[in-house]
Amino acid sequence: MLDPAEFGKAMASIVKDATATLLKRIEELEARQPEKGEKGDPGADAPPVEIDVADVVKQLLATDALAQIVGLEVAAHLEENPPAAGKDGERGPQGERGLDGKDGADGNDGAGIADLMIDRDGALVASMTDGRMKSLGVVVGRDGKNGEPGKDGRSVEGFSRVYAPETHEIVERWKDASGEQELRYPAGGIRHKGYWNPGVKATAGDSWTHNGNLWIAVRDTGAEPSTECKDWTIGARKGRDGRDGKDGKPPPGPVKL
């Protein structure tokens, strides 16, 4: 924070240095004795010389050089003595709550479907309860060009669907005009295959027992089941060993008849 006393001292030093030459010249003029000549008529007394320091300071401050010097001194003083940051002001009081707005007008009633019909272009038109008509698109196909009949559909003969346990797939077979057709897709579910051994090629959905855990393959893989392998997930962990049982009592002695 700027100290007024220190600032005044700095300004006084600057003014003193800047006016030293001028004051010295004034002293020399006052001390100089006039040269002796013929005695002339006594002259009138000259007005006394008075120096107004405040006026001199004003004139000096009006010059650019002194203004720059003062500015540099002030800037240096502020850099060496930076003013302290001001404290945060107190929080103002909370304003009052505004008035509640007016209730809005009631919305229009929703429109339902009163009736449906198909127009001459084959489009489905809905008649709404508010009197509007809305087309929902064409639902009846147009007649073929030139009145040509459409192609006959394919007939299916001997359709069958079986489960293939070796691949865990559903196999569908049928026969049509183009020949025999077959479609295979996974049967789904989990199928247990036994104990895993090196060289096993697991299929997605298979479960295998390894190191006491039940593992389920999430994709086709030949990797060993482990928690580090993303091809497997644990279906059931190995249980802990039970505590040892107490020794049983010896059998009773022979029974006498």
Image (cartoon, helix red, strand yellow):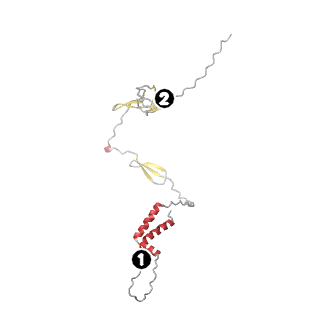
User: Dot 2, crowdedness within 10 Å: few (<14), some or many (≥20)?
Assistant: many
Q: Residue at x 46, y 62 (%)?
A: 78
Q: Which residue is mark 2?
A: 214
Can you see residue 99? no
Residue 65 shown left or right of residue 102 in the figure: left
Label 2 vs 1, first from the N-terminus: 1
Residue 233 location in percent, x, y?
46, 32
Q: Secondary structure at mark 1?
A: helix
From this viewpoint, which residue is outermost toward the top?
A: 257
Residue nearer the viewer, 158 or 75:
75
Question: Which amino acid type corresponds to the residue marked 1 in the rendered image?
Answer: Glu
Spatial CA distance of label 2 from label 1 is 117 Å
Q: Nearer the viewer, residue 103 or 37?
A: 37
Q: Which label was assigned to residue 48?
A: none
232 shown above or below 70? above
Q: Residue at label 1?
A: 28
At horizontal 32% and vertical 44% (from top left) the residue drawn is 145
Describe the element under mark 2 as helix, strand or loop: strand
